[in-house]
Image (spheres, grey):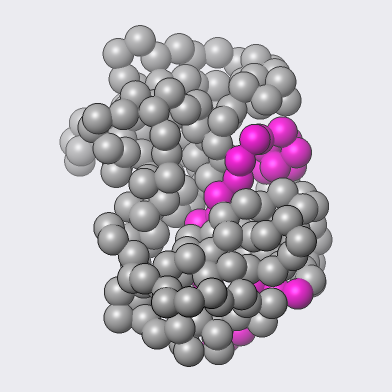
Amino acid sequence: MLDKEGIAKRIAKEIKDGYYVNLGIGIPTLVANYIPENIDVVLQSENGLLGMGPFPFEGEEDADIINAGKQTITMLPGSAVFDSAMSFGMIRAKKVNLTILGAMEVSENGDIANWKIPGKMVKGMGGAMDLVASAENIIVAMQHVNKAGESKLLPNCTLPLTGVNCVKKIVTELAVLDVLPEGGFKLLERAPGVSVEEIKKATAGKLIIEGEVPEMVI
């Protein structure tokens, strides 16, 4: 079973040379620490930065340089800083190749709920709705089950939706799964030490298994 860092490491392998990538709040921000050195990518932070680097070492933080989640970050040589209007202009114009988001729930047809739990105070939806409506490719980094042990990969989302039919791939502490165009979660890889049977029990939505399922290589 993977921890949050393990999920981030596995997702980093999905990033291709030349990509412009937006990292959402939570586990996705950790991906910046694990991008392979042999590829050239540009990380976008929706609060107005192109060229985001890994998290700073302790004692080297600059409180004026933060990501969308208000965490201190670093800027790489050649970075650009701009206002939110320009940032969302880039997003809505589909200039971002890959968006990596967290989620509370994902449905078997690729719907995502990640901004609100009814009855709980929320600051706002942030940029998630723009991102899921505009990105060419969306990968979700999430826990497979909630704190009560209930599946978060469902036939249909029960929470308010952020986007419809948009998620392409999911990486959890248990597995890597594709969301198929015709619906269903196709199991691609399982976390080290995790059995297919454990993944079946943790997945409420339609799970598709074809042949031997390899362990992740991280």
Q: Residue at x 50, y 39 (%)?
A: 23
Residue at image location 43% in from the left, 23% down from the top: 18
The image shows residue 22 at horizontal and vertical percentages of 53, 34
Task: Establish if 39 lies above or below 210.
Answer: above
The x and y percentages for residue 42 are 43, 24
Number of marks in the rendered image: 0
Q: Is residue 133 visible?
A: yes
Quarter residue 33 falls in: top left
Name above or below for residue 78 compared with residue 117. Answer: above
On screen, residue 23 versus residue 60, left or right, reads right
Magenta span contains residue 134: yes
Q: For the point 45% across and 83% down, which residue is it?
A: 196
Image quarter of residue 72: top left
Q: Residue furthest front?
A: 211
Q: Is there any visible trace of residue 24 in the rendered image? A: no
Residue in view at x 60 percent, y 16 percent = 83
Magenta includes 17? no
Side (left or right) of 61 relative to 137 = left
Q: Is residue 88 above or below residue 3?
A: above
Q: Pick the quarter of the image with the N terminus.
A: bottom left
Query: 162 or 70: which is nearer to us?
Result: 162
Image coordinates for residue 50, horizontal then vertical, percent: 47, 20
**Image quadrant in which you'd find residue 87:** top right
157 left or right, relative to 180: right
Q: Quadrant of the C terminus?
A: bottom left
Depth check, front residue: 78 or 188: 188
**Camera-nearest residue between 125 and 196:** 196
Q: Which residues are magenta?
A: 127-155
Instruction: Give the x, y percent position of residue 101.
Output: 56, 49
